[in-house]
Amino acid sequence: MLNNERPIITQSNREKIASILPIAREDIAALLEEELERANIVSDEELPEDVVSMNSTVKFLDLETDKESIVQLVFPQDTNIAENKISILTPVGSALIGLRVGQTINWPFPNGKVKQLKVTAVTK
């Protein structure tokens, strides 16, 4: 539905994300749960450098607006908009987890629009 390729997520991130799903908005929790279920689960050591994981800094492009953004993907308690730290429980955060550089995803947003986001760079 969202992306033909399976996301890549570490076992430790999968467990932490699954543990916070009960505090997420229902729509985001359902989408994240679906992504966790279809993900390729790897150890922390096996995670490729170009995959978005928790605490990664991600550069991505909104293909509709051609706007490029750089954010760090964090857990809710570490969110800081002034420092571009966004929660995994936001629409953008939940869309990016597990994607590789060059991958594009179509992700539904609360306003009813589906955004097409492309990951262009990842740093750990």
Image: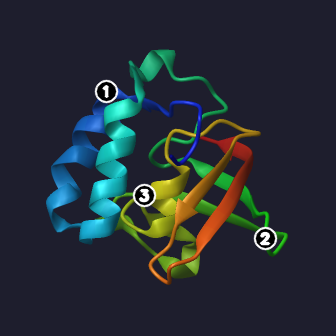
Label 1 sits on residue: 11
Mark 3: amino acid: Val
Comes first in the chain, label 3 or label 2: 2
- Expressed as whole percent of the image width and height from the top left, the position of residue 123 reads 66, 42
| Element on which disc 1 rests | helix
Model colouring = rainbow
13 on left or right of 100: left
Label 2 sits on residue: 64
The residue lying at 43 percent from left, 32 percent from top is 9
The label nearer to you, 2 versus 1, is 2
| Element on which disc 3 rests | strand
Mark drawn on residue 74: 3
The residue lying at 44 percent from left, 46 percent from top is 54
15 on left or right of 34: left
Comes first in the chain, label 2 or label 1: 1
The residue lying at 50 percent from left, 73 percent from top is 109
- Expressed as whole percent of the image width and height from the top left, the position of residue 99 reads 59, 40
Badge 3: residue crowd in 10 Å (few <14, some 14–19, many ≥20): many
